[in-house]
Image: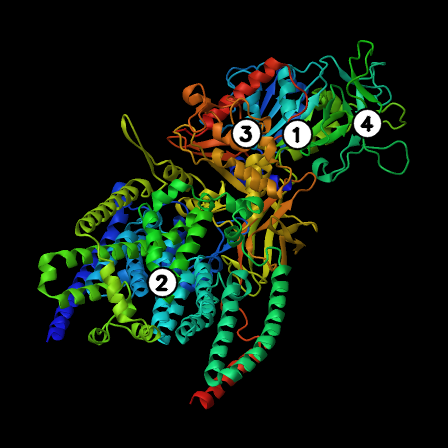
Amino acid sequence: MSLKLIAVFLALIPLLCSSFSPETPSDRRVLVLLDDFAVKSSHSLFFNSLKSRGFDLHFHLADDPKIALQRYGQYLFDALILFSPTIERFGGSVDAAAILDFVDSGHDLIVAADSNASDLIREIATECGVDFDEDPAAMVVDHSGYAVSATEGDHTLIASDDFIKSDVILGSKKIEATFFSDFSGYMRQAPVLFQGIGHSVNPTNSLVLKVLSASPSAFSANPKSKVTSPPSLTGSSISLVSVIQARNNARILISGSLSMFSNRFFRSGVQKVGSPTKHEKSGNEQFLNELSKWVFHERGHLKAVNVQHHKVGEVNEPAIYRINDDLEYSVEVYEWSGTTWEPYVSDDVQVQFYMMSPYVLKTLSTDGKGRYFTSFKVPDVYGVFQFKVEYEKLGYTSISLSKQIPVRPFRHNEYERFIPAAYPYYGAAFSMVSISPIFFG
Amino acid sequence: MAASDAHSGASIRHAFGNVLGFFILLLIGVLAFSIRLFSVIKYESVIHEFDPYFNYRVTQFLTKNGIYDFWNWFDDRTWYPLGRVIGGTVYPGLTLTAGTLWWMLNSLNIPLSVETVCVFTAPIFSAFASWATYLLTKEVKGTGAGLTAAVLLAMVNFSSSFVPSYISRSVAGSYDNEAVAIFALIFTFYLYIKTLNTGSLFYATLNSIAYFYMVCSWGGYTFIINLIPMHVLLCIVTGRYSSRLYIAYAPLVVLGTLLASLVPVVGFNAVMTSEHFASFLVFIIIHVVALVYYIKGILSPKMFKVALALVVSAGLAVCCAMVAVLIALVASSPTKGWSGRSLSLLDPTYASKYIPIIASVSEHQPPTWPSYFMDINVLAFLVPAGIIACFSPLSDASSFVVLYIVTSVYFSGVMVRLMLVLAPAACILSGIALSQAFDVFTRSIKLQLPSVSGQSNVDAGEASSGNVVPNDPVKTDKNEDTSKERTSKKSKKKEKEHVEKPVSKSQIKKRLLVLPLETSIIAIILLVLLGAFYVVHSVWAAAEAYSAPSIVLTSHSHDGLHVFDDFREAYAWLSHNTEIDDKVASWWDYGYQTTAMANRTVIVDNNTWNNTHIATVGTAMSSPEKAAWEIFHSLDVKYVLVVFGGLVGYPSDDINKFLWMVRIGGGVFPHIKEPDYLRDGQYRIDSMATPTMLNCLMYKLSYYRFVETDGKAFDRVRRTEIGKKYFKLTHFEEVFTTHHWMVRIYKLKPPKNRIRGKIKKSKSVQNKLENKLEKKRTKKEPLLV
């Protein structure tokens, strides 16, 4: 599997280069497709947050016949936000395949579905590895995890705090209440309000991450009718918000709720049923802003540059190594902070010296300034080896470097000229030479 | 006075014979060279087949980087990712020869390209080989008077320069080890016989050097190092031991083994493998025999008997102990110390039972009967006559030739490739037969023609004795012997040995051999006709059968000549359209060509040194698409190349080789089972084929889109419609197909960027989406020519 990934990434390096300029991997131009321009104002807090971070938002109706993702083979946008859950057919040249191509060429995507999500939106989600509940009327219902709200009996407004445990995806600042009333002495995360449809992800799918999961008591069904058959999605297997990092490091956010992005949810307070804590402000704003930072590559984007290897005591990279050479290997890894490349510091970056299987596997030491290095001895096996760095860490873009280097056996004149075991034979030869004149001479 | 007349007549005759002989030799050389140029004339000056491409690439490396880099060359472009140590695994003789030729020509300011030199190396050496054959035959049948020698020469050279089986391996462009090795083989034999006849250490040393050249050139050197001991043993057993035999053999073993172990590819094998044991065993035996003869010489017969009893008992004990140790050593290795190819020579069924990789090579198959007539033609009938001629009388040298022909007939019966070794032996023997026949007939005519016979009885007697010298060299008169300066020591020695033979008896015998005039004339005409037919056949074989370079194919049809240059088209595509470090997987047959012509890294090639690696590729080819993709991907393969002959009817394509892939793959990876690919034991690709067959990668890559060519998907090699016509590839994409579809190149698709969810959408939506995606993909697909 890892091998496959390497090759994929190798194959996709040119793609990556064209999609993110290596200097500034963050997205700049974002196309927002809406069902209705009302969303622009009703979700303005989210959009403003993006604008304030320097994004250039282009709003269009999803069925606007003039919209196009690319022109003359060049993509016009770096990212796409689909806030149009009901759209059946996009305007212009945009369709599901175009959007998937957009992702496959390394661009980012945010999709918000809703209870009446169209087949088109569902299809895009499925292609990305997220399966929405097939029942078009179904919503996530949670009779013990709903948020206390004005409309009593509506258990579709869920307050969920089952986040993925990753500082990279959700930011290091904990999603927390502005004040805490339970005086329990520790900070509680403010739950995120969610109202919409649930989806499931295939646990074997290594690319999809459940960022926000439903509680074990949740299920997905039509809230307006009686539940007659067992719901297809139940419990914490229901994912409310998922992210996908494709193999080309394009990032996708899929949410089952459009309203969770809305100003109303951003601003409203939240109290989970059964919980004494009343949060003044829901966690939505921080959750979604941090998540959008991740999706738009403002965080967790690594680059590895400047791979160097050479024999110990030398500077230049050789074209070929000999077996049992001592060599030094170094690589520099940086993380994009949103504005600059910062040294990435970790103690788990490893290099392999690989020929069909790793002959050497070494953890690289770092100097804290982004440079990772190690030294080792070439194994006593000749062949075409590769220096491989495969770094896949939750929330980070994966690094896959491989550099081919042949290893040759000894040259004919690199063996020992005289070996101790052969001295009797040398002696025999020379004694023969010195004695022969007596016999023949 | 009559005697001096006879002398002057004889010397003029000799001088005339020598001059004639020289020109015949020269012309034969030219003929041998030029008959091999059909391929250049009919096609172009191009390297042929598969192995020559590797040799060409090695020669290029040699001329560019010098001998030390060549010696230490580690090639990282084949056998990825294992690599291959070329310097230590290649027989360098051919490469060094061509490299030296090139270097000499260049230092003489004749700027020939390396390729040109490589193309013409084989014809040049075939001229050398026919001269060497002449020398060998001359040694075998003794130095005769010039004219007969010239006839002999003409015959032998004629047949040796023409014999089709040798032509097949030495046409211009067939730049393979055998091209120089056959010359080296015959020359080594010549020097051995020369040493045996003269007892000269000088020739013995030359012989070792010739043997060294042979070891450098070809793995077939084991034939020499087994045949010569066999002959020595034969001589000892038949009581023909002499000091000449000792001189011919002992230095060869010592020096030859020392020199052979200098060749990196042989190295310690020269003393460690069973192929060489026979020579050491005979080496011991000849010393024992020499000791016995020595003791016999210095002791009285009575004492000798006592000593013999002592030596025999002690010697037997020592021998038993040594044999026991030897057997124990040999038995401890699984293959009994023999290499697979040698074992399959001893037991012809060995390879097919245990090593499919050796059995899969067509030139390792036993030849069919017609191929004997195709390859040695008339010679097949003349060889028995030659053998009989060798027995009258049997000398050390002629017994060697008999042994040579017998062993080479056996070996050629096991492996079609060794027909090559048979060819010179057949030439020598049929040359002898022909010259003997001519000798008898011409003498008969001469004796019966009134004008000649009436002239002088002495002349007739002289002519007959002069002419009959090769027939029986030991019977020459003493005085005539001294007059001949070219008479060797050997015939003197022979004379000493056979001096008791009555001269008068031989004279009577000669008279008895005289045939009626008409019969002689008719027989000569018939023989000439036979020779003419042979020439016609050989030229035809050279021109039509053996000159095809196999990378360019031609076919004649009602609308003219068709040229199939698909191989070079495909390799050129690879070299222009892929990255320099991309790996190309194909069946091993095409490995050498891909590295040499496309300059791309290959996984396996024709140097089949690693069975597991080949089995991996075989398994991938016999697996379903996904499993195959994973295997190839784990080997970093970017492109897969298959050869497909179904459209134009090119029979040696990958589908026909496929069962070998299954066998070789299944030999290492047992989940590939041959019966899964066979329906009731039959290999078929039509609608009756097994599902495993129809789903394997090789079937899919060969027949992908095949139905688009004629709408019926009719395979012109298998002469049937294929079983599964419409299918899609999921893990591979076609990137290039040559003009006649003979080579198809596929690229491994990268793994999916996203992993799809599980839910199957309603069919219509799904189809719509897929159609759109498909459309997108086809747009990006490169144009198929």
x then y, percent, for residue B686: 51, 24
Left or right: residue B633 versus residue A222 is left
Amino acid type, mark 4: Glu
Up/down of B465 relative to B165, above or below = below
Left or right: residue B59 versus residue B726 is left
In primary-sequence order, the first of circles 3 and 2 is 2
Of badges 1 and 2, nearer the viewer stands 2
Separation (CA) of disc 3 from disc 1: 71 Å
Separation (CA) of disc 3 from disc 4: 79 Å
Please name the residue that numbered disc 2 is placed on.
B398
Is disc 4 in contact with disc 2, using a CB cutoff of under 8 Å?
Answer: no
x then y, percent, for residue B396: 38, 66
Chain letter for the residue marked with disc 4 in the picture:
A
Please name the residue that numbered disc 4 is placed on.
A280
Please name the residue that numbered disc 1 is placed on.
A49
Amino acid type, mark 1: Ser
Crowd band around label 4 with a 10 angstrom C-alpha radius: few (<14), some (14–19), many (20+)? some
Chain letter for the residue marked with disc 3 in the picture:
B
Q: Quadrant of residue B623?
A: top right
> Secondary structure under badge 2?
helix
Separation (CA) of disc 4 from disc 1: 20 Å
